[in-house]
Structure formats: C-alpha cells, structure tokens
Image: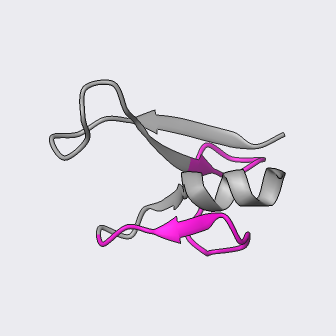
Amino acid sequence: MLNILMLHDDTTPPQQYLLQVIQNYTPEPVTSLTHATFVRKVSGQVLINAERWKQNRA
C-alpha cells in the first residue's frame, strides 16, 4: 500500500492537491526517488507526478 499525504499550499489551485509520499513503516516522508512516478519539488519534498502515474497505470 502506498502512503500519501495530501498537501495544499498557495501555489496550488483550490480544487487540486499535491501528494507527498510517506514511508511504509514510519510516519516520515520519503526522501529518495525510488519509483518512476516520484518527482522532487524544489523544497525537497518527494511528490507523485500525476502524468507519470497515469502513463504507468495505462
């Protein structure tokens, strides 16, 4: 199971969220790009890229 945290900040539109990846066994955020759908934000957060996720699921 993939653990994600829904984030919303001033840069995201009201109806959209950023999905931050959380580790499986601790409540800590993931810090490395271990999957093809993960991208790193300038702040260092590892997020899920929606376009890559859709391509990977097709």
Q: Residue furthest top?
A: 15
Q: Is residue 31 magenta?
A: yes
Where is residue 14? Give x, y as percent. 25, 26
Q: Is residue 57 magenta?
A: no
Q: Is residue 7 left or right of residue 39?
A: left
Q: How is the image coloured?
A: one colour
Q: Which residues are magenta?
A: 21-42
For this rendering, which residue is in front, 1 or 17? Answer: 17
The correct choice, above or below, for 28 with respect to 9 in the image is: below
Residue depicted at x 15% and y 40%: 10
Q: Main secondary structure of the magenta part?
A: loop
Where is residue 54? Give x, y as percent. 69, 51
Residue depicted at x 61% and y 75%: 32
Q: Is residue 22 left or right of residue 47?
A: right
For this rendering, which residue is in front, 29 or 36? Answer: 36
Q: Is residue 55 left or right of residue 40?
A: right
Residue 21 seen in render: yes
